Image: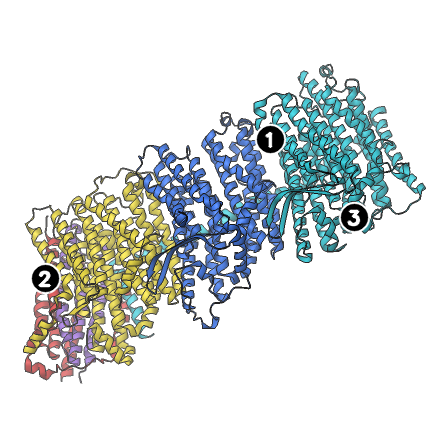
Chain colours: A purple, B blue, C red, D cyan, E yellow
Amino acid sequence: MLTVHHYLVLGAILFTLGTIGVLTRRNAIVIFMCIELMLNSVNLTFIALSRHLGNLDGQIFVFFVMAVAAAEAAIGLALMITFFRNKESVNVEDFNLLKS
Amino acid sequence: MTDHLLSLMTFFPILGMVALLFLPKENGNLIKGFTLVVTIIVFFISLPLAFNDVFKTSAGMHYTEFVPWISVGEFFTMNYSVGVDGISLWLILLTTFIMPIAILSTWHAVDKNVKGFMALALLLETAMLGAFISLDLFLFYIFWELMLIPMYFMIGIWGGKNRIYAAVKFFIFTAVGSLLMLVAVIYVYYYAIQSGIDMSGFSITQFYQVAIPAEIQTWLFLAFAFSFAIKVPMFPVHTWLPDAHTEAPTAGSVILAAILLKMGTYGFLRFAMPLFPDATHQFIPFLALLSVIGIIYGALVAMMQDDIKKLVAYSSVSHLGFVMLGVFALNLQGLSGGMIQMINHGITTGALFLIVGFLYERRHTREIAQFGGLAKRMPIFATIFLIMTFSSIGLPGTNGFVGEFLILMGAFESQLRWFAVFATTGVILAAVYMLWMYQRVMFGELKNPANEKLKDLSGREIALMAPLLLFVFWIGLYPNPFFEKMTPALEQLLQQVNGTEIVAMVEPAQIQLPELK
Amino acid sequence: MELIFFYLVALVAVTSGFLVITCQNPVNSAISLVMTFFCLAVFYVMLHAPFMAAVQILVYAGAIMVLILFVIMLLNLGAESKRRYAHNVVGGAAAGVVVLLIGSFIVLRGQVTGLVGDITPQVIEQVGHTELIGQTLFTRYLLPFEITSILLLVAIVGAIVLAKKEV
Amino acid sequence: MHSYDYLWLIPLFPLLGALINGLLGKKIKNETVIGAIGTLAIASSFVISVIYFFRLLGDSQKVHEQVIASWISVGTLQVDWGFLFDPLSALMLLVVTGVGSLIHLYSIGYMHGEEGYYRYFSYLNLFCFSMLMLVLGNNALVMFIGWEGVGLCSYLLIGYYFHKKSAGDAAKKAFVVNRVGDFGFLLGLFLLFWTLGSAHGVWTVNFVEIQANAHLLGAGGAIVTAITLLFFLGATGKSAQIPLYTWLPDAMEGPTPVSALIHAATMVTAGVYMIARMNGLFAMAPDTMMVIAIVGAATAIFAASIGLAQNDIKRVLAYSTVSQLGFMFLAVGVGAFTAGVFHLMTHAFFKACLFLGSGSVIHAMHHALHHAHVHDDPQDMRNMGGLRKHMPITHITFLVATLAIAGVPLFSGFFSKDEILHWAIGSTHGHWGLWLVALFTAGLTAFYMFRLVFMTFYGQERMVEKAKKHLHESPAVITIPLIVLAVLSVFGGYVGVPELMWGAHRLEHFLDPVFGATMATYGIGMLPHSAAFEWGMVAAAVIVATSGILLAVFMYHMRPDLPGKVVASFQGAYRTIHNKWYVDEIYDALFVNPTKRLGTFLWKGFDVKGIDGIVNGLGKLVQLFSGALRITQSGLVHNYALTMVLGMVVIVAFYVFR
Amino acid sequence: MENLVQEAIANVNFAAIMPSLVLTLFGMAILLVSVFLPRGSTTPVAWLSVVALVVTGFVSLGAWNNPEVGFYGHVALDNFATFFNIIFLVSAALTILISDDYLRREGYPVGEYYPLILFATAGAMWMASGTDLLTIFLGLEVLSVSLYVLAGFFRGQLRSNEAGLKYFLLGCFATGFLLYGIALLYGVTGTTNIADIGMYFAQNPAYISNIMTLGGVGLLSIGFLFKIGVVPFHMWTPDVYQGAPTPITAFMSAGPKAAAFAGFLRVLLLALPALQPEWSTMFWILAVLTMIVGNVIAISQTDIKRMLAFSSIAHVGYALVGLVAANEIGISGILFYLLAYTFMNIGAFAVLVLAGKKGEDNLTLDGMAGFGYKRPFLAVAMSIFLVSLMGIPPTAGFAGKFYIFAGAVEAGYIWLVVIGVLNSAVSLYYYLRVMVYMYFRDPAEDFGWVKMPAAAVVSIVLSVVGVLYLGVLPGAVMEIAKLAIF
């Protein structure tokens, strides 16, 4: 029997994968993709819960999360482009001007 | 007029400061003169206090003013509540008296950024007077902290070569103590509220009514005492003092020694002791021990100094140790002695700092070894210096003796008998370090050619010292006018601290203690 | 049957998610991510949210991922990443494991106790998912919807301001 | 009923003199005027003192108090500006003003041409004022004003030649050592005040009341012993007794008239006076009395021994002063208050005469050496000799005074010293040991005083040849005081001729109102002795004194080579006493240097390294901590994210597993 | 269907969103205006924006004591929201006033800058007035996205790029956690409406200890804690503050921080009061950590912007103390403190804006040497702000700290307060050091920026007035803050 917990666990696994990606990858764009992965796992969780609870609020939330993700993507990529223009890199280990 | 005498007196310097900002920056003498006039006016405003005989008979607060200030519903209220009694009376007068002298001393000493210096000095005067007249603990705290900033700048901008270290040290030492006091202040307030007292602001007279259990008093007293002890300064938290004094400009040293240090002792008298009588009794042996150590320690360290100003600074540690010992004797003689010694220290040590300043202005050094044989070139200076030296030593006939004698006698009569015995050795040591210094500076052959052309004191400098000399002998020979006005207030204080008559307003069982987390 | 299908798709989703974080070439990562998104769309359908599935594909796979790929190409990042992992890869992985443990613990031991509403699959069948979403979105979620417009405006303005070459 | 309303004028005159000279002296410039003002001031006091003295003689009431104003009034402590005029203070007044006047007069000539002439007279007047306050004060605090005031003036006058380092050192030493004594005085006063007050309800520092209520403390008790011992510590400081005598010899750095006035005739006797003043108290503490007697005797012989080997004329006199003060303490220690005061008085006469005489000699020597352009020490007796031809008046007066101090019969010192010796063995508090020591000291005194006389006035003229022709007698303003004092040295003793010698001992009767009650109450007095025993004692004293003189005559007059041989054969002993038993060095090693070292340690070790070290160390620690924490701020997004995840894990775990 | 429309129309209550509505409309209008203005002339836009903020301010004030709800309970314009709206508007206005000349100096006179600030302010307003987790989330995103852009606004400056990118990556990362938390809470309660969540837990207290609730709260908190800058989620703060354009740093340290506090307070106090013992304990620890880390690291900083960033972390720690107390005084103390902090911190940054040279390489301690003599007015103002940051009377910083500590003492958290004041003592050191350099050191070189732009001076003067007013006569505002809490 397929329960909501299946989806929740799957969401947790994907979330974790996203987290690991953020923590380990060097490429800023890949990191951003991992964040997208995290958001998607949250979306999955929302929709599963929404389905389970029989109300649409969760799905609507996902709708907005998607919009937010789109906005973030636009801004994030613009930032990466500007950074790349100056530094020829989007490697987060090259973000080393500001520290300590 | 008399209704608002205290406010007028306290805030007049601020008015002066504002007016000062409109004076041309370049004309240093105009600015100095203006400031001098302001401080003298303040002195005359405060003068009626000295001639009011009500203090001879009444222990309570007079010239009270009360204006609601901050009120946040049932959270808390603070009021502008001021007044003066026999204890604060003399410190107020000391402040208004010393300030013109300090300002006058800057005539040739301060030449850079005169406007800034004078503005700070006036701000400082307001803060000091405000602290002495406050009857609201919160108000007191505001003024108390406000004093830090002008002094910090005075040391830091117009000080000697190690001024930054000294200024920061001064600030941090003093602020650390007062921050802990702040916690205690808040705690007392809520304690009072929770024990059912309808507090009108942080009124100290109402706080006196609160019966606080001894174990809580302990902590609160420690917080207050720590703060005040740093300001006094008591051993072992005195180390900011030598640095601050050494680096501060003459006027700053004078104000610092004469008035600012009294904040600490005044704090003990006004707040720490009457608010927490049980804890006071509990800690007296310990604090008295620190006082006595301070007396001897300050003297021994002073003895070995090779910088005159530092020597005088350490002598302050010693003298303030006497004051605290007298205060902790908790009898009339000790307290009166402590009070009069506060004034004495203000006058004598203030004068000594001025004297050091005179030397420094002439020679730009304070190293004892640079001097010697000055008595020959500067006889008037030598005489005044000698008188102040002996006043500091506590020669009978000068003010120092009256204070020290009463303190030691008071301490001897109290439970601090053995402390008094050890403290009395301070009398010997004072002679050792002061006379040795005097000898090295004034006596001997005039060997250093740089000293050949030293000029004796100018008219201005003599005018500066004359009022101080007057008080040296006045207090030394006829101190009763001072005593009779402080006695009722001190007796009341004794009753509060020793008293059997403190009426517990609330049964202790009813009080819900906020839990410590 | 459904369960098996779930496990199959979940396997694909997790595998492609794993590839996202392990692929050397960002392009490959992006492709894997698109794969994951498709799997999620499948789940949305399984969860009776076909509209969300459509939006998922349109917005995520269609818009966002294309944008990302576009940028990757633009910046020519394919060959650049010799070292794909940061120096603290072990710490990151370990932290991930802990996150996973805690996350699974929460979702497994926690109870989904929320009030059960009346939007059952039957209702969705009847009314239609898109209609339901539309109704809700333009009534109860009117304000958030409008806020989103501002959000997107900001994003547009911001992207232009940032990416514009010269003043 | 006699009126003493103008008692306050007695100290006032010198004070005025001091103020006038001090403030205006620089403007006046004229030495004569300055000297006249100073001398007149003290002389006026002398006149009033004399008038009041005779008034008191004829007065039936012997104790008079006069309160000018309240000084300190704090609770139980009520201190007045008040004077006490009784036979004791009357006598002291005469001595102080009388000898003081003479010395002022003498100083006019002696200080001629000195820089700061006005300053000198101002100080001298101030000293007289202080001394008079000390004597007249009706309570311990007013006495303490005088007590410290004379200390101050002593400081100022010792340091008069402040450009000399030795003078500055000596001045400081005098004050500081006196302060040690004051420490005792103050503590004694506190203990007395507190004990009387808290235990018996008598809060007082007034002498009359102390005298009246002292018995409440209980005779022989520990507290009264402690009180009196502490007071005695004060006395040892002021009166240069063991262990605090070391300042007095150094004090000779001051001008010679100062040595005469302050360090011989008046100030140093303040301790004796103080004990006499509080005789009621001391009498109750026999243990203290014994200590006083022993210390007095020990000081007497100890100082005399040092006096044997000094070559500086003033130093010899200084040690002799210490020794004589020892006699006085021995006297009060054995209960012979009258004898102590008696010896105080006669000593004031003859010692002042000796000092002034030596001053006259030094003056002449200085003058002569100066004209001869020689830098020899004008005070060193080895440079003198044969001066009697050049300075006959000085010689005669000096000789008379020496005879007096040596205790030659019929001279004043004989009567007073004899009385002390007599009491030392014969009183209720006496002991033959004390007597023996005192007797031996008397012999030593006779010896070294005559050694001084012979080395100075007799024998070969050892000064430089060129200087000899410049030697001449001092002017009249110097010699007149010498003559007056010499006369007093001879006849001053006749007020106290004992019954044994068919006298009436007028002094004893005069002082009876002060001491009588005490002596009677506590049973202090002479044990009954046969006249033969007493005559025997007198004879012993005379014989010892004579032998001392004869030995001096033998060694320094008849066989001038002998001293050198003696010294050579007792090299070690000689060096020890010549170097004053190394007491100064021992004190330095025991007290001065350790204190300095302690001060340095506390400053550099404890203050700077310790407290500031901790404070700055805390600061450093925070900085180190700061530096360490800074590293976490690596700038790397990964680390930031990892920290966030860890924080998240901890927080969630906190919630979940709470 | 008819009903639905009726209901929808009934729920459209513009009064409930009036301030943000006005502001966004202004923002869009200004965006248009800026397009038509010639390049580089941004001054009219700046002043228009100020006008917009002032107008919005009056609109906001009109809502005082006149609460409005609407949009199906997604927003509530209550006193709480109004108080925070004023904070946002003040910080935005002060920021804009210092920006104009700064942008020209640094070579980025771009008109879009101002609408972005206005939108960010609007986002903050939604965070403060949102009564649904979704509204708050969206407000947060509007705010964040604007700030990502603004932080990276100097696109030719690597520092600015780096700041924007770091902020962006970590911000999105934190958003993930926030969303996950919201999802879990949704799973437990079936709603995202704050009032409903609160009611749900009130009716079903058993579910409070549901692990999903607890985990959700934990994850949810992280999103807010990140924005507020609480240790250990603070690490972006110094880097971003240092790299961002200085006015933006000023803005970020005041407005958005307050917004995050507003949303967080609403969630904690209205949705999760039942969990108060748990979160009080947690915030106790976090407050201590935050104060210590912020203050201690600040000590070893030489770049003043970065130092102020760490100091802002420490100040968050003080504000958290009020949250630990969670009583009326504590919470209203937070409100007061945030307002006070707005004045003093923006003031301090404003001085830095004027003190800096192009490129701002001189905003180090050494660069400030002798500042007091070269720019006496600025230095005095800076001293007042620093004194206020230290918490020395009679300044706003002291009053705020007093307020918060009073709350904590009343609630019995004495040791927390003691730790707080000891931290203040540590903070003295680095604040004083700035004063030391300004006044006690001789000037190293001349300062390049000679002109004193009127707008920036106005901003500084306003800040000084605010700091002193709140310090000397805090009663009125404290009273207002008291009325502003739930």
Which chain is mark 3 on?
Answer: D
Q: Which of marks 2 and 1 is in front?
A: 1
Measuring from the top left, give residue D57's x and y in whole percent: 79, 37
Q: Is mark 3 on a helix, strand or loop?
A: helix
> Which quarter of the rendering shows the C terminus of chain E?
bottom left
The residue carrying mark 2 is C67
Image-quadrant location for residue A6: bottom left
Q: Mark 1 points at which residue?
A: D19
Q: Earlier in the sequence, mark 1 or mark 3?
A: 1
Q: Which of B48 and B422 is in front in this view?
A: B48
Marks 2 and 1 on same chain: no
Residue occupying image coordinates x 11% and y 68%: C145
Select label 2 or label 3 by which is in front.
Answer: 3
Instruction: Specify the amino acid type for callout 2.
Output: Leu
Say left or right for E386 vs D158: left
Residue A1, can we see it?
yes
